[in-house]
Amino acid sequence: MPKMVFIERDGSHKEVDAPLGLSVLEIAHRNNVDIEGACEGSLACATCHVVVDATWYEKLNEASEDEEDMLDLAFGLTRTSRLGCQLIITDALDGLTVTLPGSSPSMLMD
Ligand code: FES
């Protein structure tokens, strides 16, 4: 089974199972990762915002126009921001790493 990693707001890394076909938002909810996802994936909020690791960002399908519009409303938007409910796990995304927005950088640099 693919895995993915959430980097939480305190900088800790949480590696979890990432079943094929589930969204990053659904996986977060299954694993008690603190992403809200208020609209349950219907592109009507931006509370499922995650910051994707730069190397992974290149491998994702491009965001739809609706996703881009919603992302503009997200708090703490970055160049590699996406909406977690729109990221669906495939084999190619095994190891996907995303950071919860507002995280403080890890103090453990070495
Ligand atoms: S859960 Fe609302 S846009 Fe993703």
Image: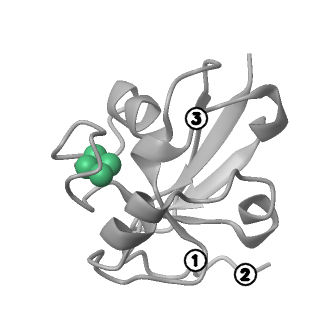
State the mark number for residue 1: none
State the mark number for residue 109: 2
Name the residue tied to disc 1: 106
Q: Is mark 1 on a helix, strand or loop?
A: loop
Q: In which quarter of the image is residue 53?
A: bottom right
Q: Is mark 2 on a helix, strand or loop?
A: loop
Q: Is mark 3 on a helix, strand or loop?
A: loop
* Badge nearest the viewer, 2 or 3: 3
Amino acid on which the number 2 mark rests in the picture: Met
Amino acid on which the number 1 mark rests in the picture: Ser
Q: In this view, does 18 lie above or below 50?
A: above
Query: What residue is drawn where x is 18% and y is 43%?
Result: 39
Q: Is residue 28 above or below residue 110?
A: above
Please, which colouring scheme is shown?
one colour
Q: How far apart are marks 2 and 3 (CA)?
A: 30 Å
Q: Nearer the viewer, residue 95 or 70?
A: 70
State the mark number for residue 88: 3
**Label 3 Cα crowd, 10 Å radius (few <14 / some 14-19 / many 20+):** some
* Badge nearest the viewer, 1 or 3: 3
Q: Do the residues labelled 1 and 2 touch (CB within 8 Å)?
A: yes
